[in-house]
Image (cartoon, rainbow, N blue to C red):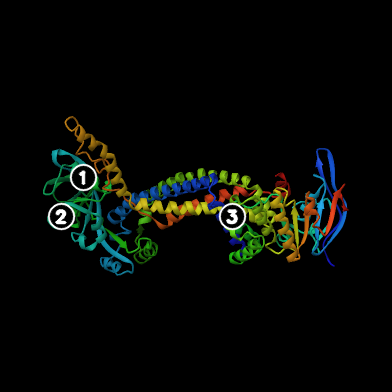
Amino acid sequence: MMDILEIKNLYKSYKNGDEKLQIIKGLDFSLPKGKRMVITGESGCGKSTFLNMVGSLDQCDSGQIIVDGTDITQLDAQGLCQYRNHTIGFVFQFHYLLKELTALENVMIPAMVAGLSRKEASERAEELLESVKMTHRKDFYPSRLSGGERQRVAVARALVNNPVLLLADEPTGNLDQDNSRLVEKLLFQIVEERKTSLILVTHDPTIASHGDIKVKLEKGKFVTI
Amino acid sequence: MGKARHRWITFLSSRYLWGRERDSKNVTQILSALGLAAGVLTLITVISVMNGLQMGYISSILEIGSYHIRIDAQDVPSEFEDTVRKERGVKSCVRFADIQVLSQGSLSRMSPINVRCVDSDAATGDAGFMQHLKITSGSFNLKGENSVILGSELARYLRLKVGDSFVIMALSGETFNTLKPKNIDFKVTGIFKTGYYEYDRNLAIMSLESVPMLQSGPPDFKLGIKLNNLYRDKALVERLSTVTGAQAVSWRDYNKAFFGALRMEKYAMMFLICLIFVVIGVNIYNFMRRSVSEKIEDIAVLYSLGVQEKDVRRIFITEGAFVGIFGGVLGVALGLLISINLNAIFAIAGKVVSWPGQVFSRLFGDLFDFAGVQFQLFSPDYFYIQEVPVQVMFSEVMFAFFFAFFAALVSAYLAVKKLDVKNPASVLRCE
């Protein structure tokens, strides 16, 4: 099976005053297409940093990140924007929906950025909102939605351009247990249906148990659990 | 910018500007747009009134004083007038003379005056001249012997009315040493008003037959030519000068200093009013900077969705453009509405101001009576105008609109020029 993600000799450090914190230390790893990978680990161990690097929101010190055959460390600014728009989808711990837009419009935006007309984007967004069971709330602004509903809209937004890889950074971290289960269920169900690969960072052992590949980030490297 | 990109940027900008979730930021944007509208409104109204006043002077000068083209009649053959009248674009061609004399009216009041001698049939030969010369008393009759038509202010100063006689002192003699003053009696047959004080106070109109009486030596006749389109003067001036060898003078050259001063006055006024836009521009710059810093999370999210940095800038610049368009359109609409109805607005304002006095009179009529006092903002008693003249020019309206629009656009551009989304992860991690 072809790998959707290949990580080769990846290093990442942060400067904390004069001190250099090595977060990722020579990471080598690959994720086969369509698989669901769950990353756990202690707070501050570098889980989100790893996800941000794969999502090209952060830069690595050295190494290669090859997503769907493309080494994203070699892409220019425009190439990275296209990569973020077409290849991956991002779900954050906080929904980060644009408050001036309705749920439907929030989901439409990435599709419109990709070049779809408003009508096409709307059709695709409605389809996604139906998948996350939010059709009845599509014309509501984020301020009128509950935490769980907002996160479901965020999931729909992340998937609207049919990405090959979905990155989810503690998507249920801010939700109560019922909503966590609902979002978790929908998330895994959708990626299963769409054959989308998933990398999910979580502290929640229930969610972690759903992963095809379960790793723990420890001392800058993945440890299979 | 691609059509698809333009579409979503416009969509998002309009949502940021007119987002249905109202909050205080919209107030700032609305105030900025209203500020622009106020600037455009002021610019259009002031410039339209200025145009009205200046065009009143200019058309009086061109129709009564300078003509569109003037040429010395001595330098051209006698049949030349008919030839010129047949030229394409020529509305009229008349013979005239300007002479300066001293006049004396009732009560021995004296005044130097300019006498314009024209054909006694000027009423039919030069429609523009007659149109600007409103006869307020008597008639335009120069056919009687020694008839004169006086400007209203001159008649008032000399205490003359229609039918009165007055004396003009002219000089006779061939050389400077033999010049002698002579008094000639004239009879006032009409009084005119042009609305241009200079003419109303200093101009008297007589027939061409009076020229030998007023001027010693050969009469100094000129030909005054008027065109259908006064801006098509250059070609005719060139042709006349070439054909006759005489120097034809265009209205542009003849009135260069005065018209130049009027133009400078208008530009200076426009410049001063345009300073309003600088203040509004700074306001837009500030609200846009604040908007950018408030939306730093949105910017990071958009970046994570694949939006390019330059497109994020375009979102805010488009927002500024929307403010500019809204403010500009509103300003143009209100500016035109006020300019076109300015006199009606002043009349209403006058009534509103007079109203308390009338109420006061009703209550305390025995002590104070203001019932008959009607306040006028521009009373003809104090201002030399019957009503405020207004002339709206399309090009200037467009200038005001685009100036406001570009003020908003440039302010927005400067506000987001240094926007830097180098590390969106750190913004999104802050939460």
Q: Is residue B248 above or below residue B39?
A: below
Residue A154 on image: x %, y %: 67, 55
Dot 3 and dot 1 within a common chain:
no
Q: Chain of mark 2?
A: B
Q: Is residue B112 left or right of residue B334?
A: left
Q: Which residue is mark 1?
A: B154
Among numbered discs 2 and 1, the one appearing first in the sequence: 2
Q: Is residue B215 left or right of residue A33?
A: left
Say whether residue A100 is visible: yes
Identity of the residue drawn at 28% across and 48% down: B387
Label 3 and label 1: CA atoms lie apart by: 72 Å
Please, what secondary structure does the residue beneath circle 3 have? loop
Q: Is residue B49 left or right of residue B142?
A: right
Q: Which residue is mark 3?
A: A101
Please, what secondary structure does the residue beneath circle 1 have? helix
Which disc is residue B188 wearing? Answer: none
Residue lying furthest front: A178
Residue A128 on image: x %, y %: 66, 63
Label 2 and label 1: CA atoms lie apart by: 17 Å
Residue closest to the eye, B91 or B185:
B91
Q: Chain of mark 1?
A: B
Q: Amino acid at mark 1?
A: Leu
Tag nearer the camera, 2 or 1: 2
Please, what secondary structure does the residue beneath circle 2 have? loop
Residue closest to the eye, A186 or B103:
A186
Q: Amino acid at mark 2?
A: Ser
Q: Chain of mark 3?
A: A
Find residue A159 and report its image quarter.
bottom right
The C terminus of chain B lies in which quarter of the figure? Answer: top right
Q: Are marks 3 and 1 in contact (CB under 8 Å)?
A: no
Which disc is residue B139 wearing? Answer: 2
